[in-house]
Amino acid sequence: MTAKRTLAVLTLCLVFGFGAVAGCAPQGASEPAGEGSAMPATGEEPQADSRSYTDEELAVIAGEEGTTHDAINEDVYPGKDYIDQLYDRWDAVAEEYAPEIRTLPDGRMVQRTPTEYGIAPGAWQTQANTNSYNTYWLDADNRGCGSCHADLGAVLKNMAFEHTQVWNDDIKSNLTVQECINCHHWAPGYMEKNMEFGTLMHAVHFGQRHKVQFSDEFGGNCNSCHNATDNGQGMEMWDLVKYDHLWGINNIASEDLKDASFSFEQETTQDNAFSFEWMHAYYDQMRHGAGVQETNLPQSLFDSWEITVDGLVGAPYTATLKDLVAEAESAGVVIEKTSKIVCSWNMVGGGGISNVKITGIPVSWLVEKAGGVQDGANGVRAMRADGSSKRSFSLDKLNANEALLVYKINGEPLGAKQGYPCTNWVEGVDAQVFSKQINAYTVADDCPPDFNDSKYCAENYDGSPNGWFDENGVIVNRPNATVLDVPEGLVIETGKPYDFHGYVDAYNERISQMEFSFDGGETWTAYELKDADPNRVVWWHLQWTPPEQGAYRLTVRATTAEGSESKQTHTVLVNAKDVLPAQEETTVLETTGLVAPHAVAADQA
């Protein structure tokens, strides 16, 4: 007998064959009771029972306080067969609507929907734990972006119209719908009103071009993306609220999180510095195209490239990059270090961040060659050769040698996307001032700001944004604590340590604390980060062992030494199993860009 049936029997207060509802006590307990039989599906009344019961059995049936069922045959209960039939029916539903397990092209398995069967239902009905609530009632396998698009980054990669590169394969970031909403909801200067998220997504899925495929082929409807509520919030985005509604997620309070261990480091580097390839201007597109085609740009471009230092300096000059590099290397002033690049747009969960080893000439040395900074100057403007950017940085960055003319990344010449032959690099500010193919440094008295080429920056900040402002002027991504390389519903093994990892960053602020929650943010476990360098990415690790089968969600957030706290948190779901299923027992995906929903896939099998 299964545990769930035993549970139902032990709590059952039956009246079949006994008649007395009050107190659930049988009438005429001293007389033989009718023998229980399964209630027919037609609704016929059960037959009488001629069996006699012991005093102990009668006491249990009567529900007397202190009685026990341990030594009693469960089959003596009238209606037992009927209840067995119900559970058989529910078991069949549970099997038919079992959450889908997918095998991704990289061999890992994911189960997007928790398995809730057999859990404590949180309700008095004992049968509630067999209802297949998530899949039969909520249809959760067929809801949310991940039901059709196992990897949103892959979707954007394969668009007919090339999307800005917001994914990052080097750090294995997992794009979330919240990132899409952040940018398409509020991005003045970058995204116009006609690109707002709701308008765009409804048109894409229900427009003339795709509505037949979305509705007929994939079974899509409003509930595919939304959660209709009675809480006054209307049609919520399912992906943003699903963890509040799904059953079967195990919660672990902070005081019970005893075996987790935390660590961080800042030395790991990526093969390439990320590039969002905004394609603001014509030459941005040229650089992007050359990078996509892996064009080898000629050495002659490096040798003949000129750098000018002018403005409020004693002796302006122009020299070739080749000669400047040779002179700086001979003078021993070249700096080689691990440093980060991060975009102001980079949202929680995003891929717009990298740690790389840079080789460059301090801009302070270049300015000293020009006779030094004259009185009245307050910053340096980095001039891009194509004229598309005139971003500036402060004299503090200049004097601290945090501004560099970079000509190598990871020991190699820059690629086309990175701005070959050289790029401006300033630590402690966002990537907006990392001007590619820079050809001049102008010391000026009106820096910052001069952000006429960015409506967003001009309205909100007096230098570099160092974060993304929402419509209320609040930076939503400083600090940014992100979990990496955990596809939705990743299947892991119980009893074996799993290494959650990711990054945490706050631009120019130092990360002082990270917090982790396994109960949806009710309680948090905090870890201090001592001596973290704000000019490098913090790569964190949380090693944790799932204690038993079931779904678990991890939520992360952070705090800086300057007092900033995460405005948005990042949550991922994993499914722990005692035994991993065989691949042939799963839905094997050949692509993660567009995947048929579970129900459709089952019909086609």
Image (cartoon, rainbow, N blue to C red):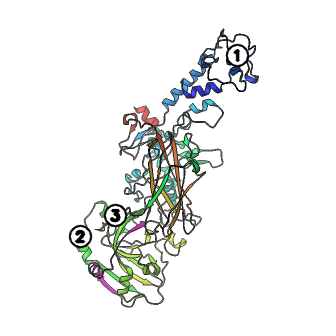
Q: Give, as a single range, the part of the protein colored magenta.
A: 315-341
Q: Which residue is mark 1?
A: 55
Q: Above or below — where is 355 with respect to 7?
A: below
For mark 2, does the 10 Å Cα neighbourhood hold few (<14), some (14 to 19), or many (20 or more) residues? few
Q: Amino acid at mark 3?
A: His
In the image, 111: left or right of 138? left
**Residue 458 location (% of width, % of height):** 51, 73
Specify whether residue 313 is in view: yes
Q: Above or below — where is 436 with respect to 179?
A: below
Q: CA distance from mark 3 to mark 2?
A: 16 Å
Mark in the foreground, 1 or 2: 1
**Mark 1 or mark 2: which comes first in sequence?**
1
Q: Amino acid at mark 2?
A: Pro
Do labels 3 and 2 touch, CB within 8 Å? no
Q: Which residue is mark 3?
A: 288
The answer to which image quadrant residue 302 occupies is bottom left
Residue closest to the eye, 553 or 30: 30
Q: Farthest top residue?
A: 50
Q: Is residue 47 magenta?
A: no
**Mark 1 or mark 3: which comes first in sequence?**
1
For mark 1, does the 10 Å Cα neighbourhood hold few (<14), some (14 to 19), or many (20 or more) residues? few
Q: Is residue 329 magenta?
A: yes
Q: CA distance from mark 1 to mark 2?
A: 98 Å
Q: Above or below — where is 493 with respect to 18?
A: below
Image quadrant in which the N terminus is located: top right
**Residue 74 location (% of width, % of height):** 61, 20
Disc 3 secondary structure class: helix
Q: Which residue is mark 2?
A: 298
